[in-house]
Amino acid sequence: MSNPASRRIVLASRPTGAPTPSNFRIETQPIPIPVRGQMLLRTVYLSLDPYMRGRMSDAPSYAPPVEIGSVMVGSTVSRVELSRLPDFAVGDWVLNQGGWQDYALSDGKGVFNLGSRLEHPSHALGVLGMPGFTAYMGLLEIGQPKAGETVVVAAATGAVGSVVGQIAKLKGCRAVGVAGGAEKCRYAVQELGFNECLDHRDPELKKLLARGCPKGIDVYFESVGGVVFDAVLPLLNTHARIPLCGMISHYNDSELPPGRDRTAMVMGTFLKRRVRLQGFIIFDDFGSHFGEFQKQMSEWFAAGKIKYREDMVEGLERAPEAFMGLLEGKNFGKLVVHIGAATA
Ligand SMILES: NC(=O)c1ccc[n+]([C@@H]2O[C@H](COP(=O)([O-])OP(=O)(O)OC[C@H]3O[C@@H](n4cnc5c(N)ncnc54)[C@H](OP(=O)(O)O)[C@@H]3O)[C@@H](O)[C@H]2O)c1
């Protein structure tokens, strides 16, 4: 083995508000040795995802927090380096929860063997993995889009949103994206095929969105909250559907926002327009559909019907900075960290 040590990034402290570099610490350890019933996995790609902000906090959630001093959690695409398990051979690519580190030991539970030959291994973290699956089930099962309807997509160029918009187009809908900045909006329209894309930083967002959705909004794929939700709310049609996927503009909030309580106004709108809003946690709620999704998405991707963009960051040591940027919209496409060489 060329690398005599394994680096890992642990949670050093819990953030208040936006995470800072001091919340993370890099440590070096000897490469672990697998015993019988284990294998040694070498991380090649690490996925960085918004949910990790929740794991840094000890507030009650659907999953336990990362303990102080423990490795940051995360999905990884890794290679089997040593195996003492019958179903995994040296050189196999696997999708696992390896976390922010060079090497991980595994007993094989929850590890998905991707085989020894893969054209695009990192795609298992994006369009063909959890984010693509989230887009697919959230839009089709909860959003129930029908041809001719208007679908508005928050964080439209991101890992989830980019796929939502493209599926909406495949289903014959008008897809209107909302994204941060002119370059992302141009990409959403010219490359991904959205009918329009609007910049959420534009002070005229409400007016622009009303103009972009002349027949109102039938499906709003919510990933952001904040000003995007405020612009969407008055435009929701009767019987609109909202797949509630995320609220990223609020993930760093440490207290309620100032101002009047708007709950009654929001709920009143939902009541009068008979809006159906459903939150979901992708694998908890739809895990049994993963095979169906993989088959369909692989076909669409191979046929060029779904485009995919990665924002690839080089080096484990850059993961904290890249993750902090994700919460500010600095990524452009699915954020992935390249940790180690594809071949040893
Ligand atoms: N429910 C589930 O099971 C599930 C599964 C996966 C993901 N999610 C959620 O889906 C959402 C998107 O996740 P992703 O992995 O696809 O991430 P992503 O869209 O690739 O990256 C996050 C994007 O969010 C936008 N953003 C960040 N801070 C913002 C702010 N303060 N205001 C407005 N926009 C902001 C930025 O895009 P712009 O520059 O365009 O603003 C940023 O690029 C997140 O809310 C995530 O938690 C939920």
Image: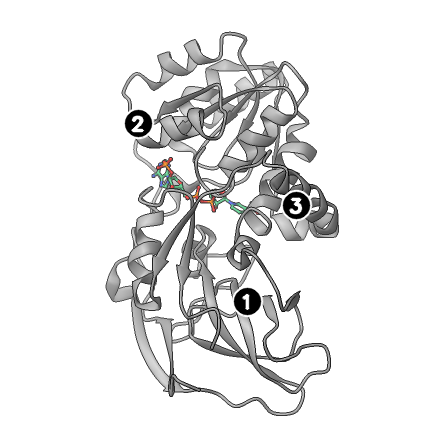
- Amino acid type at image mark 3: Ser
Residue 279, compared with residue 274, is above or below; it is: below
- Position of residue 39 measured from the top left corner of the image (x, y, whole percent): 60, 82
The residue beneath circle 3 is 298
Residue found at x 40% / y 60%: 337
First in residue order: circle 2 vs circle 1 = 1
Residue 57, compared with residue 109, is above or below; it is: above
The residue beneath circle 1 is 97
The residue beneath circle 2 is 182
Q: Is residue 285 visible?
A: yes
Q: How far apart are the two marked residues, 2 and 1, measured between alpha carbons? A: 35 Å
First in residue order: circle 2 vs circle 3 = 2
Residue 144, compared with residue 34, is above or below; it is: above
Q: Is residue 179 visible?
A: no
User: In which of the image's four quarters is ligand 1 placed?
Assistant: top left
Check disc 3: other Cα within 10 Å, few if <14, some if 14-19, many if 20+.
some
Would residue 315 be found to the left or right of residue 168 on screen? left
Check disc 2: other Cα within 10 Å, few if <14, some if 14-19, many if 20+.
some
